[in-house]
Image (cartoon, helix red, strand yellow):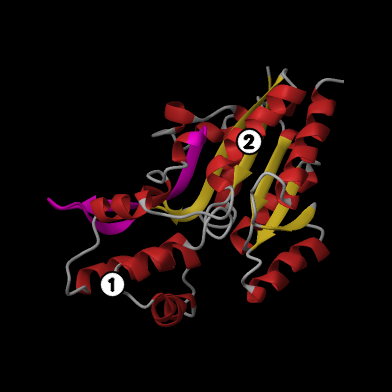
């Protein structure tokens, strides 16, 4: 079986921004958090990802209702809603591929700057071969968020593209951060980058867009059709030549995005079986 990797960002790609949704579920003003807490750190030359993690820890410590815990993140994750069609998307694409290209095996991945404890506990998580996201250290009897443990920011995301390429996934990718640096000839990569499809929405996805596009893989920028303020960002990715297409984040059976994913699978499958 020849593998094709379909790799997704999470926040604003498969669902709305999960950190904002978490804050709102806790009765916290998300807009105020991003504008007053995180942007203040950004202006002090913080990287945006550890900035939001640190700001969330500080907020948790001051919270009158009590700190944010691992259990709270897990419970929130189980209730999350997704963009149209996301919950059935992997099954739909697998079924399509098996019927048209029985020699091809699809693998699905998530690489996210969001909170790993949320991403891994959603109902869609079992549909993915592997998931990488930013992580917190949890402390105390109640496992309160205490410190950023893992930060996955802009170019950090490309590390996991290389891990997928080299087959460093699952348990063997844990607790061995330098394994990805092992020299492997490109011809020996388990999944070459031209056999990858990457779907993202924002600036943290730009390095992945650029890397996969450089190797003639397929990249799509998605946007929320109900948020016109987000359209320009997605369009700019197209104008900059970073993505193969710009589509609404609608993963239902007959959507343009799903049809484009199917066409991308067809194109890569043809290369693999020539």
Looking at the picture, how far across and down is residue 187, in whole percent?
Answer: 75, 24
Residues at marks 1 and 2, CA–CA distance in whole angstroms: 40 Å
Residue at image coords 58%, 53% = 84
Main secondary structure along the magenta-highlighted residues: strand
Crowding at mark 1 (Cα within 10 Å: few <14, some 14-19, many 20+): some
Crowding at mark 2 (Cα within 10 Å: few <14, some 14-19, many 20+): some
Classify mark 2: helix, strand or loop.
helix
Q: Which mark is residue 92?
A: 2
User: Which is nearer the eye, 7 or 190?
Assistant: 7
Looking at the picture, how far across and down is residue 185, in whole percent?
Answer: 70, 26
Looking at the picture, how far across and down is residue 55, in whole percent?
Answer: 35, 70
Residue at image coords 23%, 56% = 69
Q: Looking at the image, is 126 positioned above or below residue 19?
A: above
First in residue order: circle 1 vs circle 2: 1
- Judged by depth in the image, the label closer to the viewer, 1 or 2, is 2
Residue at image coords 71%, 65% = 234
Badge count = 2
Q: Looking at the image, is 22 positioned above or below residue 3?
A: below
Q: Which residues are magenta?
A: 127-148
Q: Is residue 233 highlighted in magenta? A: no
Residue beneath disc 1: 59
**Camera sees residue 185:** no
Residue at image coords 72%, 46% = 254
User: Which is nearer the eye, 117 or 38?
Assistant: 117
User: Which is nearer the eye, 215 or 144?
Assistant: 144
Q: Is residue 145 highlighted in magenta? A: yes
């Amino acid at each position: 079986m020849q593998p094709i990797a379909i790799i997704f960002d999470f926040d604003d790609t498969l669902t709305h921004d999960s950190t904002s949704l978490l804050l709102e579920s806790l009765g916290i003003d998300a807009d105020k958090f991003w504008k007053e807490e995180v942007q203040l750190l950004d202006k002090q030359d913080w990287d945006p990802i550890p900035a939001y993690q640190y700001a969330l820890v500080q907020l948790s410590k001051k919270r009158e209702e009590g700190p944010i815990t691992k259990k709270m993140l897990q419970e929130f994750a189980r209730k999350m809603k997704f963009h149209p069609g996301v919950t059935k998307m992997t099954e739909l694409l697998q079924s399509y591929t098996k019927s048209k290209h029985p020699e091809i095996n699809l693998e699905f991945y998530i690489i996210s700057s969001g909170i790993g404890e949320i991403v891994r506990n959603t109902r869609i998580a079992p549909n993915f071969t592997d998931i990488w996201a930013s992580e917190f250290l949890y402390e105390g009897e109640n496992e309160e968020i205490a410190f950023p443990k893992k930060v996955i920011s802009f170019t950090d995301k490309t590390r996991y593209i290389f891990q997928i390429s080299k087959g460093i996934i699952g348990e063997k990718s844990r607790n061995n951060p330098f394994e990805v640096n092992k020299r492997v000839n490109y011809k020996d990569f388990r999944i070459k980058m031209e056999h990858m499809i990457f779907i993202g929405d924002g600036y943290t996805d730009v390095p992945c867009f650029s890397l996969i596009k450089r190797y003639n893989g397929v990249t799509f920028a998605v946007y929320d059709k109900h948020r016109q303020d987000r359209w320009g960002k997605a369009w700019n990715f197209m104008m900059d030549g970073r993505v193969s297409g710009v589509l609404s984040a609608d993963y239902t059976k007959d959507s343009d995005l799903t049809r484009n994913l199917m066409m991308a699978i067809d194109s890569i499958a043809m290369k693999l079986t020539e």
